[in-house]
Amino acid sequence: MIIMQQLITSFIASAGFGILFNAPRNALVQCGFVGMFGWILYYILVEVGMDAIPATTFAAMLVAVLSHTCAKLFKKPIIIFNVSGIIPLVPGGIAYNAMRNFVENDYYTGVQLSAQVMLLSGGIAIGLMFSGVINQLINKSRILFK
């Protein structure tokens, strides 16, 4: 039952942010699925015991791969699917708690949470970048072997 809740809420969040970012209406369902698959991979990896930072990186890689695939299949810009797809992975709650701890003069906890936010954000960036590099290498190898 928990998995179904995770699937539904991550789909709604991703598609909802697609609406906020003015994604084309005919791409909203794909945006939702990209975010949903990225989040469910993250959720499963964390549930089996992986640390949140590598799980976020792998989920971001999946989001990027699915974004490239959707962009080619539906002839839309990749950024539409990337931005909507990473929304469930963004560590907004942790960032909020970090700032709240700074305001409450609990600097030790605030610094710990801020470091975690930066590591998770870096994992998202690395995942998106790594997948983009792999995609470029595949495209260049196709050109070389033609």
Image (spheres, helix red, strand yellow):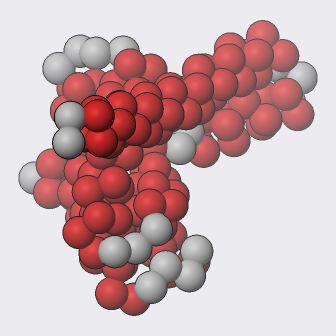
Q: Farthest bottom residue?
A: 25
Residue at screen point 58% across, 74% down: 21
Q: Tell me if residue 43 can be seen.
A: no
Q: Farthest front residue?
A: 146
- Considering only vertical position in the picture, is 82 above or below 20? above
Quarter location, residue 110: top right
Q: Quadrant of the C terminus?
A: top left
Q: How many marks?
A: 0
Q: Farthest top residue?
A: 108
Residue at screen point 10% across, 52% down: 1
- Considering only vertical position in the picture, is 52 above or below 40? above
Residue at screen point 46% across, 68% down: 77
Quarter location, residue 133: top left
Q: Position of residue 67 (x, y in %)?
A: 35, 56
Q: Position of residue 92 (x, y in %)?
A: 60, 45
Q: Farthest left residue?
A: 1
Q: Tell me if residue 110 can be seen.
A: yes
Q: Position of residue 78 (x, y in %)?
A: 44, 61
Question: Left or right of 114: which side holds 48?
Answer: left
Question: Left or right of 122: which side holds 42?
Answer: left
Residue at screen point 29% across, 34% down: 144
